[in-house]
Amino acid sequence: MSGIFGIVSKKNCADMLLYGTDYHSHMGTEYGGMAVFGKQFHRSIHDISKSQFKSKFFEEYKEMKGNLGIGVISDRDPQPLIIGSKFGTFAIVMAGLIENLDELGLELLKAGETFGEISHRGLNSVELVAKLITRGRTLLEGIEGIYDRIQGSASLLLLKKEGILAARDRLGRTPLVIGERDGEFAIATETCSFLNLGFRIKKYLDPGEIVFIRKSGLEEKVPGKAKNQICAFLWIYTGYPASSYEGISVELVRERCGRSLAKNDPIQADLVAGVPDSGVGHAIGYAMESGIPYRRPLVKYTPGYGRSYTPPSQEIRDLVATMKLIPVKEVICGNRIVLCEDSIVRGTQLKNYTIKKLWECGAKEVHIRPACPPLMFPCRFALSTRSIKELVARKAIRALEGREIGDVREYTDPRTQKYKRMVDWIRRELGATTLKYQTIEDMVEAIGLPREKLCLYCWKGND
């Protein structure tokens, strides 16, 4: 999942754009970019796979002049893109995933379109979306039209010289929130980007809603839709603790998840810990509910190491996982540890670079408590897990069944023997003393939205 940020300011916006975009750095690891409009468009994109966003742009942003700007932390494509069109020139950024990218690209090529943003990964999904938009009779018709064509999700910001058009994904799988400060406006994926810049939340965009933001204020162009299926994983892992979605705090959801994990858990332990950073809130909730003290046997060395879940290659993921967590032997040795984690995706990093460190430092027991159920399906709406074969739950099922199976419903029901056998296989694979997953019912209750308003695809395999 990428993170996008826009600003409509009374003065030069480049500094606020830099910091507002930087507060989305946890959302992607591939590219960072900014575009500002003053007398003309000024755009810059950098590869941030081996360095931090702020360090790439810290000198360059000082040359950007203008009152309007958009920025992005991208998990796949270089962006923003500057597009010359029949509607005039505009810049565009996008958060989401186009699952039928190649199919739509081939259709446009046959219709005579050309693409300039081609890489080893193929078409640039942001350019494809821009091309689809420009085929409409108006910009609004073009934006609405993309949701009739794409499979996946897309929330976008489109910067014109008059202001910013902001469109939230039709099913709301990716969020967009507007903030206001003394008559200036910002729009972001993450509300945590508002706090230190002095913006207050003004409006959470509804699914499918399109607004135009200019210096004079907000104008609703297309009203939102009633149906909402926002990604539940935002609260469990992807989102920043200081953010909120649909008015619901990430940190408080994680605490409630931890409390649910602790209820009816008979484990006797000496301390509770969270895998830094996203497991910490879950562990605090577990400690509050259980009465077992919260301690830090693993600390994260922050500078230069991002999330180990998001990089595209296993080699980079393993390197980040190896280097970023440092064990505190004096806290670990001789203790029974409950270790809360946001999720178990592939399992290799938890096994090789987390649990292994605890055992090597003399842990007496290691009890793993993930805050969500076993992941069964790769996400169709954001770039995270890439294939079914990567998921540790699917590896367990293949080992138990001796083959790949299509119907995994018995393995998603905690009451079945197959589910219990799968969990025990994963426990042994990880090298943990015990393993107990969160139930989907408790996870949904911790989030606090009706089940039908959440996207649970990666656990259930249906929209």
Image (cartoon, rainbow, N blue to C red):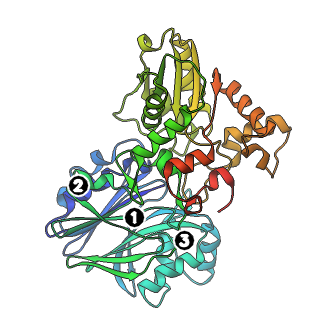
Please state which amino acid type lies under the numbered disc 2: Glu
**Relative to 121, 461 lies left or right:** right
Picture quarter with the C terminus: bottom right
> Residue drawn at (80%, 38%), measured in percent from left and top?
418
- Per the model, the C-alpha gap separating discs 2 and 1 is 27 Å
Q: Amino acid at mark 1?
A: Leu
* Callout in the foreground (3, 1): 3
Question: Is residue 44 visible to the viewer in this orientation of the structure?
Answer: no
The residue that disc 1 covers is 176
According to the image, label 3 marks what residue? 227
Give the residue at mark 2.
60
Tally the numbered discs.
Answer: 3
In the rendered view, does 254 fall on the left or right side of 57? right
How far apart, in angstroms, are the residues tagged by discs 3 and 2? 42 Å
Sooner in the amino-acid sequence: mark 3 or mark 1: 1
Q: What is the x, y in percent for residue 53?
A: 33, 48
